[in-house]
Image (tube, rainbow, N blue to C red):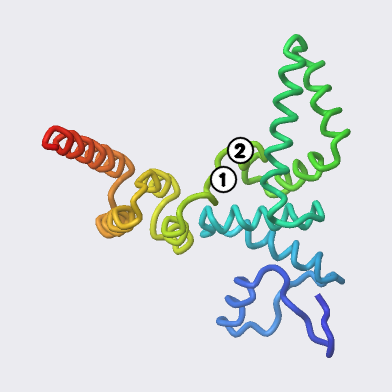
Amino acid sequence: RPVDGGKHEVVAGERRYRAATELALKEIPVVIKELDDNAAFQLALIENLLREDLNPVEETEGILQLLALKLGRSVEEIPPLLRRLQHERKESANSSNNVIGKAESTEQQESSAENPDLKIVESVFESLGLMTWESFANNRLPLLNLPVDILDALRDGSIEYTKAKAIAQISQLSDRVDFLEQAIAYNWSLSEIRQRISEKKTTASTSSTCLLYTS
């Protein structure tokens, strides 16, 4: 987009720009648009969300930011809004269980049209093509409630999301940190992680029983 002084700012496509710079290209094909700060930020967010190397935490936080911009709300307001929309959809489904086929599809479309927030949410996820908003609410929002040490490992790409969720079950911070470091160092599979956690729980339970009988 044009900026002061006759210069231009890269809004989206920074990696391609850097690649062109490394190749010492003199000219590159670009699209120049007049954008205010809000529109430029939205485009930059979308570009970032479509990166292949984006980790689940970055993706989740980026989608929340984009929804906040589109809906004109704070990021903190988005999770409860999505949960409310889920509840409303569930209630609507329960009240129309006797409606099937085409009539049911029509009712859902009318429901979306009547709820401007839902319409915006659906359009955002349709444009991204990453997942549905229901899947995001069910599987991604809980991610942000994980312990800080687990979130940090996810952010730097040290461990996969499914493994991180399993390790988060360890409640004791020191035990969890030690376990996480070992899981990363030895690249334990998800099945290995689950097995070792199960063994830890069994050992802890056995120790508690022994102490009880001793006392």
Residue at the limit of the structure toward the front, as seen here? 215
Q: Could you tell me which residue is drawn at 78 percent across and 68 percent down?
A: 40
87 relative position to 143: left or right: right
Whether pointer 1 and pointer 2 mark residues with C-beta atoms closer than 8 Å, the reply is yes
Q: Is residue 190 above or below residue 185?
A: above
84 relative position to 182: left or right: right
Q: Could you tell me which residue is drawn at 81 percent across and 71 percent down?
A: 37
The image position of residue 89, as x and y in percent, is 73, 28
Q: Could you tell me which residue is drawn at 81 percent across and 64 percent down?
A: 39
Which amino acid, by three-letter code, is at mark 1?
Answer: Arg
The image position of residue 46, as x and y in percent, is 69, 58
> Looking at the rendering, in which quadrant would you find the N terminus?
bottom right
The image position of residue 177, as x and y in percent, is 33, 58
Residue at the limit of the structure toward the bottom, as seen here? 5
> Looking at the rendering, in which quadrant would you find the C terminus?
top left
Q: Report, in whole angstroms, how far the alpha carbon at label 1 lies from the one at label 2.
A: 7 Å
Q: Quadrant of residue 108?
A: top right
Which residue was labeled with disc 2? 135
32 relative position to 16: left or right: right
Q: Residues within 10 Å of mark 1 (few under 14, many from 20)?
A: some
Closer to the camera in the image, 141 or 7: 141
Looking at the rendered structure, the secondary structure element under dot 1 is: helix
Which amino acid, by three-letter code, is at mark 2?
Answer: Ser
Q: Which dot marks residue 164?
A: none
Q: Earlier in the sequence, mark 1 or mark 2?
A: 2
Q: Is residue 11 above or below residue 122?
A: below
Which residue was labeled with disc 1? 140
